[in-house]
Amino acid sequence: MAFDIDMIKEVYASMGERVGKARELVGRPLTLAEKILYSHLWEGKPSQKFTRGKDYVDFAPDRVACQDATAQMALLQFMHAGKPKVAVPTTVHCDHLIQAKVDAKTDLKRANETSNEVFNFLESVSNKYGIGFWKPGAGIIHQVVLENYAFPGGMMIGTDSHTVNAGGLGMVAIGVGGADAVDVMAGMAWELKFPKLIGVKLTGTLSGWTAPKDVILKVADILTVKGGTGAIIEYFGEGATSMSCTGKGTICNMGAEVGATTSTFGYDESMDRYLRSTDRADVADAANEVKEHLTADPEVYANPESYFDQVIEIDLTTLEPHLNGPFTPDLATPISKMSEAAKTNDWPLNVEVGLIGSCTNSSYEDISRAASLAKQVADKNLKTKSKFTITPGSEQVRYTIDRDGYIDTFNAIGATVFANACGPCIGMWDRYGDKAADGPRNTIVHSFNRNFAKRADGNPNTLAFVGSPELVTAIAIAGRLDFNPITDKLINEEGEEVMLDEPRGYELPPEGFAVEDAGFIAPMEDGSGVQVVVSPSSERLQLLEPFVPIAPDSLKNVKLLIKAFGKCTTDHISMAGPWLRYRGHLDNIANNTLIGAVNAFNKQTNFVKNQLTGEYGAVPDTQRAYKKEGIRTIVVGDHNYGEGSSREHAAMQPRHLGVAAVLVKSFARIHETNLKKQGMLALTFDNENEYDLIQEDDTFSFVDIEEFAPGKQLTLEVTHKDGSSDTIKVNHTYNASQIDWFREGSALNMIKKENA
Ligand code: F3S
């Protein structure tokens, strides 16, 4: 399906020489991640050694993938770049804008009505600029990419943080903001700080109730949501090679939950099998010819401590199934400890809904293993206690599991099959109508990746736990959070005690994958005549105006907009759920700016002081009031500010509303880059205790902004309400070209200038 075998062969043709040169420059054997990075340098053949975690490097990714929510802004930006066609193979996937409510057919029909304008826009821009278009219902971006485009040793970027899923097929695939995607689509280099490397050695093999999901849930426990920041995680060992390719995809997918730049696995037979079963025997053949470059040099895995910055070892034979949550994906509880943990934390034991599928876990293996449990409901005369839903990852998976009878098996336990789309995984789940904000305290379990408050259903009182599809299915059957299928019995309809048998399934469909209409629309050979129309009165789409540079003068009287307390993810900065409908309309979506952030002074959300009037109000309204007076503002935050997704809206919205700077204890990588791209100041406290100095009525002055230079601290004078002041030092990671973005107003302004 439109994958480019010639492009892949070209990558492989130059790999040997580039890897050889890199090995010589680095002076030692190379990890897989290094081989892929050094063979995708913008300069071509490597000419220098890079320092991990320090050097900014220009790369030349092979592909770009965009999902519908982020593609709108990415394509709106690309249209400004002045190019006739995308420079590298690019695809757009319509998956985020389909709300799950009734069932696949009804929900898809409704989405096609309500988001028609956006889908048409994306399709026509794709057609015009040579972009492959996957229509609504075709599937979730990461599953479709794994099935069609991912290839061992390749490098890809995607406008979604779970782009990293393609690491399951041995890629270095990285989630970026739309602005980065625009660079690559426009034929420019893509810049990344050369990542650090974490090696995860998997010994033993998975068996019984334990699934690949449990590996990443355990890694999240060890590394926490910050532990992978700035690093590529490379998995290896017998546990890695004995696992399915799609299982590897699950593990890589949730690498985003530990903040990792990406994760990857060396090429092995499971990948060969997966490529052949998804109709890409030619890719498998090509990969087999260069397979020594598609995994680390043997010395690396024999002695990992000498080559990785950090090494973790997990024994799969003794690994227990886990449930992680609630509210954060790194709070891991082995299933045998859940009863105790739930009691201690007062987590509601009754499980209302079990949800499987999503981009993270909807492989044929996942579904067949979950179905083997669902089948036991009838066989053992049980009754499923929780509601149960399935979101297939692609039409190919859905069609195949339907053909093989699994959908019938799930239907027999009362399941709802949602559209092949994100749905509940991204908050597009209409569970409560307009009552979500005051929803009841309740527990759900799902096999997705994220479980931040409100993430699935918009209800802040929903406690979401993440587990493997097998465990989620077993728990949904039992209806209890503390059900441990390894040890616990269930009482069936006849009052007998029964136990669930271990899940069983197939790595790949024994009769092969099948599909009638996969949902792909190829672009026209010459799209120059295609007209892209955006109505000026549209609520959903708005053509962009270039950002005006932030004048140094305006940085002398900067007001505090909000001092965010604790976790402030991109969901807090630019909420998803119902707001997804405005992703292509900057002014409209700006009305959700920071409404989920907790104000450090009153611990409330969306309730901040307007220093001009002394009154409290919503963050976007307060910010618009400052903007009206021509006053710039600053946002102050805690650690890992902007963790979560790659959405550049979280940077564009504050920028559009007039925020000049974000000053935090530390940043999540993608968000920091996004702020830079939009021409803002992304700064960190030199002394993080100085976060405590910031008061509600503070005014900030950037005293040496005229001397903004790489590696040079900036000085900030903070004047308090009583007239006293503090002078603090702040750090930044801007290099010279990023400082140009700030001076020009945005990276896009820079591209346009260079194209002029
Ligand atoms: Fe979709 Fe992202 Fe999940 S692509 S299915 S929302 S994590």
Image (cartoon, rainbow, N blue to C red):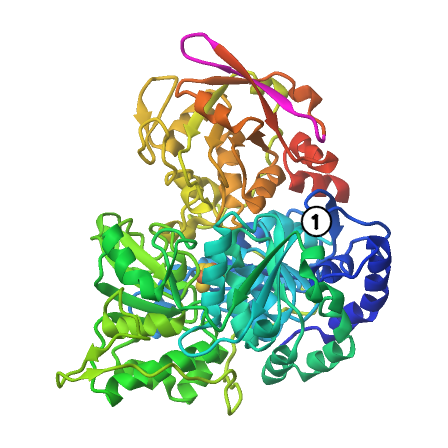
Instruction: Estimate the x, y position of residue 632 in percent, counting from the top left.
Output: 51, 23
Instruction: Estimate the x, y position of residue 663 in percent, counting from the top left.
Output: 53, 30
Q: Quadrant of the C terminus?
A: top right
Instruction: Estimate the x, y position of residue 728 in percent, counting from the top left.
Output: 56, 19
Q: Residues within 10 Å of mark 1 (few under 14, many from 20)?
A: many
Residue 69 visible (yes or no) = no
Figure check: 429 above or below 649: below
| Residue at horizontal 57 percent and vertical 78 percent from the top | 242
| Residue at horizontal 66 percent and vertical 71 percent from the top | 151
Q: Quadrant of residue 241?
A: bottom right
Segment tinted magenta in the rendering: 710-724
Secondary structure at badge 1 equals loop
Q: Quadrant of residue 86?
A: bottom right
Q: State the residue position of label 1.
A: 194
Q: Quadrant of the N terminus?
A: bottom right
Residue 750 visible (yes or no) = yes
Instruction: Estimate the x, y position of residue 389 in percent, counting from the top left.
Output: 32, 71
Query: Which of the two residues, 561 or 268, is positioned nearer the viewer here?
Result: 268
Membership of 240 in magenta stretch: no
Q: Amino acid at mark 1?
A: Phe
| Residue at horizontal 37 percent and vertical 22 percent from the top | 610
| Residue at horizontal 31 percent and vertical 81 percent from the top | 374
